[in-house]
Amino acid sequence: MNHEEKYLLEDQKRQARLDAFNQSEQVSSLRQEIAMTRMLIEEAINANSPGLANNLLSTLTKLQHEHETAQLRAGELLAKEKILQLGQRMIDAVLAAFQGSCPDWEDRMQAASQRLLLTMEHQP
């Protein structure tokens, strides 16, 4: 049986907005939902509604986790180990290009390599 479930709202303006969201080609709009949740948290705090703010903070945490998971699945984020491997390959490429270019090239490249890898390792 093929039937479409739809929320029906009494307020026509809200119903039109809901329908517009439903028409979106974007299956997930997590960035917008995160922004909206942040705005609602701010409003709840300003309205002195700590219970609602607390519930919204929990929702925000879940949305942020889902957004990060979606980015990982889409290949938009790299694991730290992959970034370090990429950095090492880049250093190797630079080493190959400058090999033998000046008398103390090995010491200079070693120092530069260590600084680059330390910088990458200490990023959050």
Image (tube, rainbow, N blue to C red):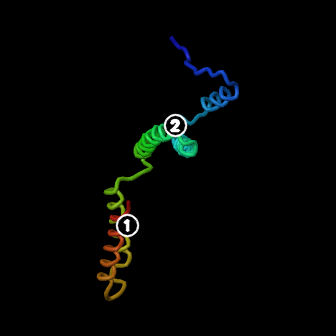
As drawn, the residue found furthest toward the bottom would be 103
Residue placed under numbered mark 2 in the picture: 28
Q: Distance between the residues labelled 1 and 2?
A: 35 Å
Percent x, y for residue 40?
56, 41
Residue at point 60% right, 29% down?
22
The three-letter amino acid code for the residue at tag 1 is Met
Q: Are marks 1 and 2 in contact (CB under 8 Å)?
A: no
Residue 30 sits above or below residue 102 on the image: above
Q: Residue 59 carries which label?
A: none
Percent x, y for residue 85?
32, 60
* Mark 2 secondary-structure assignment: loop
The three-letter amino acid code for the residue at tag 2 is Ser
* Crowd rating for badge 2 (residues with CA inside 10 Å; few <14, some 14–19, many 20+): few
Percent x, y for residue 95?
34, 74
**10 and 7: which one is in front?**
10
**30 and 103: which one is in front?**
30
**107 and 49: which one is in front?**
49
Percent x, y for residue 3?
55, 14
Residue at point 64% right, 27% down?
19
